[in-house]
Image: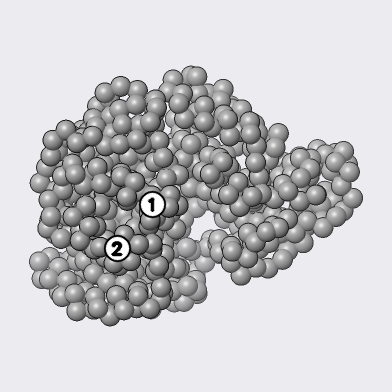
Amino acid sequence: MHSLTITRRNILAAGAAAGLVSMTGIRLAAAEGTDRKTLRVGMSGFPPAVEPALYAHTATRRIAPQMFDTLLSFDQTPAMTLRPALAERWERVDAKSLRLFLRKGVTFHDGGEFTADDVAFSFSPQHLLGPDMAGKATAMQTLDTIDKVEVIDSHTVIVHAKGDDALLEKRLASWGSEIVSKRAFEAAGNWDAWTVAPVGTGPYRIVGQTLDVDVRLASHDAYWGGLPPYATIHFRIIPELASRINALMAGEGDFITDIAPDMFAEIEKHPELEIAGGPVQNIRYLAIDETSQILGKIGVRRALSLALDRKALVQALWQDRLSIPNGFQFPSFGDGFIADFPPLAYDPDLARKLLAESGYKGETITYKLLNNYYPNQVAGAQIMIEMWKAVGLNVEIQMMENFAQIQTKPVHAIYDSSSTAIFPDMLAHAWREFGPKGTLPKVGIWSNEEYFGLGEKLKVTADPQARRPILRRMLEIVDRDDPPCVVLHGSGQFYGKRKEVAWIAGQTLDLNFGPFNAAYQQN
């Protein structure tokens, strides 16, 4: 299969070609579930592709969970407890192997039967490594420890890790571990054709997509988890927040994404509308280029963090609805959470002292800023500029158009980023950003051999108590000894919706409109 080249032309062509199929699918789904409606969702961006092994893009993660299932799943409570999904039960064989008993009677969107062969293919290099097996797939950030899938029979597999892996179960519930149809993938013939209409077992199937315009799904009525709540889902791409809000208020949409807190009151003026969502397993941070002469000084990097009154920032911009983590971690990490790790400090006096010791003399620090790629991004930057100024840091905003511009070398700046815990553990969170194959080292702006070595040791350490000193030291490096970033606060995902839409937010930025959403489980 050749490399993936999703272009405006082939997506537009695919949208036109899928038009008849789309409308037919919508009519069929509506006829089979006459009491079900179309859910109209306004999103801020178009997904680069709805193939979850390739992308962790927010738009992809909002659509992919409707189309695909994983072997295991998280319950989306704050504890993020594992539950059965395509595997109805599982058991440990040894420290690096897991036997899974697959659910029988599951069908793919095209009517094909789900079997162990699909599991083996979904975790094979041919799929996980992406086009031409180039290894750039998002899935490999957390699934690179998997060695192979051994097929025992049509509905039993053993997943083998390359070494001892206490996190294997969590990996099989993470992003990129979604199961796809082997037969449909091979029938597509190439990645371009596959990504137009990939085939999964999820509650909804794709029936059309038009680049930068919309993605259309229809109910998979044979879904193993029960009849999906909606006949169809229409994801419309509405980049401007004001336009999304207007569509919701005008009754042209049922659900919209990426609402900033300053718009909560406006939406709640309408008795038929409400705000949903809250904190998610994501941390907002400022990446720092340590290769620049000024930012290479540890004291300067620490001062950037110590100067920030995060509580005031969250109160001013987020109505105190977001958390402030103690280090680059979450309580959902369970045994991997270092609860007594010091909170992120606000200490202007120490910031001034470190700047003096570093020999900082007011040199300009560039803050490369996008125009509200993240909600409240510009307003937050302006507040932080004043906090930095108060301790003597001269930070100057430079507006940029996209991340490609920001990360053009030499970066020599700070810039906004965020990190989602793909599953509840440091190896699926901070390690994704700061490990040797992580975001910042790949950009070439940070490297720390001690941190890299600790992470590799963490991968093969299964005992929870033996992991804790490793985790603590990794947190210390990021927070104090060689900071690659300034942790700002936990992230939130807030949505506007019609009150009649039964839906409860989970702990991630994934959307879930299937029958396993907690709103439907309560009924």
Q: Amino acid at mark 2?
A: Asn
- For the residue labelled by badge 1, is the local secondary structure a helix, a strand or a loop? helix
Can residue 251 be seen here? no
| In this rendering, position of residue 122 left or right of residue 456 | left
Residue 410 visible within the image: yes
Contact flag, marks 1 and 2 (Cβ < 8 Å): no
Q: Residue 337 location in percent, x, y?
A: 50, 30
| Residue under pointer 1 | 133
Residue position for label 2? 190
State the image coordinates of residue 391 (x, y, percent, origin top left).
82, 48
Q: Please give the name of the residue rendered at 12% of the width and 71% of the height, measured from the top-left corner.
A: 28
Query: How far apart, in angstroms, are the residues tagged by discs 1 and 2?
Result: 12 Å
Q: Residue at x 66, y 45 (%)?
A: 446
Identify the mark nearer the N-term, 1 or 2.
1
Q: Quadrant of residue 343?
A: top right
Residue 351 appears left or right of 456: right
Residue at 12% x, 39% y: name it: 154
Task: Name the amino acid, label 1.
Answer: Met
